[in-house]
Image (cartoon, rainbow, N blue to C red):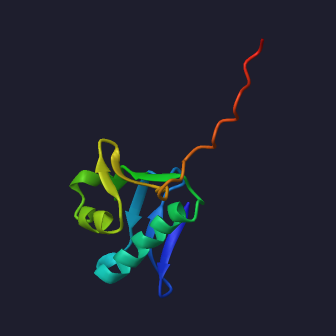
Amino acid sequence: AYVALVDGAAVLYLDRGGSSIQVLPAAEDADALAVALRSLADLVADGRVRELVIGKVDGEPAAGSPHKEALVAAGFVPGYRGYALRAAAGPGERTYPRPTPVRPIR
């Protein structure tokens, strides 16, 4: 589980499975919420987690959350399972290793 702190105040709690967040009272400040969501995006950017798919916010479906605009602003994309954030491959980079060439057997 992760807790996003902004200026020493707990703003978000991401559950152990990474599929649900709990917005804490310090998130009433929109700037603090934006910083906390960007810190979650850094988990993906740094490679600490492969993806985040937030299906629930405060126990309710993320699609109906009043914080969905903040999720989109942080880089999350709406999908059928919730708001997803995946690591982006750079130009020309593969997200999987190049296969080893195989020589034919004669």
Left or right: 21 in relation to 15: left
Residue depicted at x 34% and y 43%:
81
Question: Is 44 situated above or below 11?
Answer: above
Q: Quadrant of the C terminus?
A: top right
Residue 93, x across and y down, in percent:
53, 53
**Visible residue check, residue 61:** no
Residue 41, x across and y down, in percent:
45, 65
Q: Quadrant of residue 12?
A: bottom left
Left or right: 7 in relation to 73: right
Question: Is 87 situated above or below 103?
Answer: below
Q: Quadrant of residue 49?
A: bottom right
Residue 69, x across and y down, in percent:
24, 65
Residue depicted at x 69% and y 32%:
101
Q: In the displayed image of the protein, which residue is found farthest to the right? A: 106
**Front residue of 87 and 26:** 87
Question: Is 28 situated above or below 95?
Answer: below
Question: Is 37 situated above or below 84?
Answer: below
Q: Quadrant of the N terminus?
A: bottom right
**Visible residue check, residue 57:** yes
Q: Quadrant of residue 100?
A: top right
